[in-house]
Image (spheres, rainbow, N blue to C red):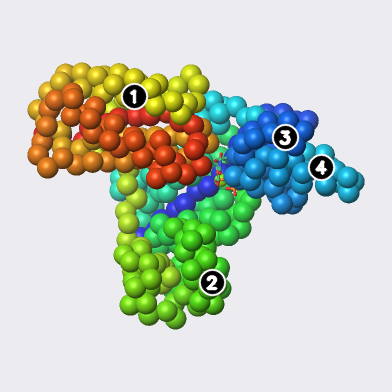
Amino acid sequence: MRIILHLDMDAFFAAVEERDEPRFRGRPLVVGADPRGGAGRGVVSTANYAARKYGIKSAMPISEAWRRAEAARKRGEPETVFLGGSFKKYGEASERIMKILRAYTASSAKAMAAKVEQVSVDEAFADVSYLKDFKKAEVFARKLKAEIREKERLTCSVGLGPNKLIAKIASDREKPDGLTVVRPDEVMGFLAPLPIRTIPGIGPKTEAALTRKGITTIAGLRKVPIEVLVDELGKWGSDLYRKARGEDDSPVAESDEVKSIGEQETFEEDTKDMNVLAARMKALADEVHGRFIKSGFKTFKTVVLTVRFSDFETKNRAHTLVAPAKKKEIIEFEAMKLLIPFMDRRENPRAKKVRLIGIRVEKLT
Ligand code: TTP
Ligand code: MG
């Protein structure tokens, strides 16, 4: 039996601001673009729970958030604080939290098999199967939460389940400061009443397609035969069929477990300028190749590109060559090919700026 833990910080950026600025505490707070009195462009990064009561949420246009905050103020409710955000600070807090999670997971007895996978700035999975039972895992999760609260003075929500899918859905159920445990025999009942969009991967498109058929809950989704889902949605349909039943065997992948050589660069200023990006790519490919040569490895077979947008959303794209290679030009060429879709709607539909790019080579011999 596996026991997977998913940790997600509560209203992360906003919580860091509240922590560091006592006069903001308890007030509705929005981190995002400058609202410019309602004329601002750009979006909300996040809102704390007080601001969410006004209907303000991540990715909403900042002008809309401003309107809602103003409407609340005119109703006599507390005024909302708008902040541009200090991403360096969030990044540092994130690093310290991930360190706590890693140290904590590794310091427990028999933790040799424990693995931690960071998936975003405020979110990570840990495989704690070595704890053997859910009761112990629950005690572990409580201590972990207490440690983060004490050391970092921030709250998080944790989900425990038999796989990543269930752990992830569970951590979101009792936010903020939640702890949700879903044992293997509880999985089907836990999922049944939840709305279909709770399943990671169901975006607005799939949701709309299913709602048109009258399917709104996961229990409802389970009534659809697999052939119908595959017909409608292709391969994703069969994934969905399994997810509706709480099945997921994807491993918690320790990111530095893979032998790889890589470099990354955070830009002074976020950019969408292809010329700037291409120039930095070339420099990175150079550095990576230099380290590859020094490493003593003879060939690589996979080139991986990491792109982090200004809102910290991070994507990795990899290409594995048909034959092992050793030339710098191959790294450069393959990384560029992977970067191009980030310049348009394919990988960047909201035309976000890029904060960081990274290149790494893997499958070294
Ligand atoms: P989330 O974990 O999605 O949100 P959250 O931590 O603010 O709130 P919750 O309590 O619901 O988990 O994202 C983590 C941080 O990533 C968030 O604080 C800000 C940033 N972010 C953006 O900048 N833009 C976005 O669209 C989202 C979803 C998040
Ligand atoms: Mg969060």
Q: What residue type is labelled 2?
A: Thr
At horizontal 54% and vertical 77% (from top left) the residue drawn is: 214
Observer able to see residue 241 = no
Disc 1 element: helix
Q: Residues within 10 Å of mark 1 (few under 14, many from 20)?
A: some
The span from disc 4 to disc 3 (Cα, nearest Å) is: 13 Å
Rounded to the nearest whole Å, what is the CA distance between mark 1 and mark 2? 43 Å
* Residue at x 62% of width, y 54% of height: 175
Q: How far apart are marks 4 and 1 (CA)?
A: 43 Å
Quadrant for ligand 1?
top right
Q: Is residue 299 above or below residue 127?
A: above
Q: Mark 3 points at which residue?
A: 39
| Of pointers 4 and 1, the one earlier in the residue sequence | 4
Q: Mark 2 points at which residue?
A: 211
Q: What residue type is labelled 1?
A: Ala
Secondary structure of the residue carrying tag 4 is helix
Are the two marked residues, 1 and 2, in contact with CB atoms closer than 8 angstroms?
no
- The residue where tag 1 is placed is 278
